[in-house]
Image (cartoon, helix red, strand yellow):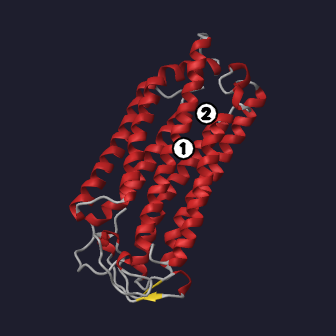
Amino acid sequence: MSSLPKDGLVALTWTFTGVAVALTVGRYAIRWRGFHKFQTDDIIHGLACLVLIGYCITYTIAFPLNYKVEFFVAGLSNEAPTPAEMDRYFHFIIAVSATFWIINYLVKFSFLAFYRLIFGVSKEFMVAWWCVFGFTVVTFFVNFISVFWACGKAEDLYVMAQCTSPSALKVTAGVVTMWCVLNVISDLTIMALPLWMLKGLQMKTGQKIGLAVIFLIATIDVIFDILRTIYTVDGGAIALDTLWDILEPTITVMVSALPSYRTLFGDKRKKSTSYKTLDYSGNTRRGDGFQDYELSTSHVSSIGGAIKSNVTVDTTRLAE
């Protein structure tokens, strides 16, 4: 069985983490340059980036032990880990697994906060938003708490004989598959929220496609989660599953920062009224600096077409 070089894995880990941090810094610079304040989604994204750094530091410290255990289990080494090392290994696995979900769901909540700022004046949208928010919270707790049942029972979590038994391995495979299903469904429901709103926007097809691409950028995370699950359940080269464990959260944080860079490539247009500057009757009100979250259109329809607001908003100001 082949293996990924440890030094190469460390280099990949910190290369991707460095890019994620750099994109996050750029996101904040763009936001601050635009309107000298940060929104809730910025704060949540920043927390995700900080947790990501801690996650990668933990993984880097544990790489030597991780390789030792995986080489022994694969029969490529006669150096058996000591009971103390196995105990540390299981604690490490649980710690990074729980942290993994914290990072991913902070990014999800960052996107949800962003979409609420854009479309929050629509009552119908907010009904859908609360449903998706509730579902996202439920899937987070299911995924997070199930980490502690990976060995079959919570009390067997750090018992090596129990966690390495065939029955426990079957439970682990089932839990990992469940994680993937819930995570993917959660991502798809979050992506569907803004796409649903696009149907009510009176704008050119090209503009709608551009917005759809921005909203669908989280598809990258869906692809990586599926690949990570496949390699975790079916196996492969030594540390290949670890590579996917590193790539998915780092790329998730990158994806969360990317929509902000949309403002660097738009043409300059006159600012106009945003969703946030409308009350439910369509009357304008003070913007409060939210023009940063504007979409280019006129006669914006709320979901279901029941309410229409005479409003023009600007795609060049769209920033995640």
Position of residue 58 in the picture relative to residue 26 (left or right): right
Q: Which mark is residue 101?
A: 1
Q: Nearer the viewer, residue 46 or 186?
A: 46
What residue is drawn where x is 65% and y is 23%? 158
Q: Which residue is depicted at the point 55% across and 38% down?
A: 98
User: 168 and 206: which one is in front?
Assistant: 168
- From the image, which quarter does the C terminus lie in? bottom left
Element class at badge 1: helix
Is 302 positioned to the left or the right of 278 in the image?
A: right
Q: Are marks 1 and 2 in contact (CB under 8 Å)?
A: no
**Nearer-N-terminus badge (1/2):** 1
The quadrant where residue 186 appears:
bottom right
Picture layout, residue 164 above or below residue 304: above
For the view shown, which residue lies furthest in the right direction?
167
User: Which quarter of the rendering shows the N terminus?
Assistant: top right
Specify the amino acid type for callout 2: Gly
Check disc 1 and give the amino acid type.
Trp
Secondary element under disc 2, as helix, strand or loop, is loop
Question: Which residue corresponds to mark 2?
Answer: 236
Of the two numbered discs 1 and 2 in the rendering, the one whose residue sits closer to the viewer: 1
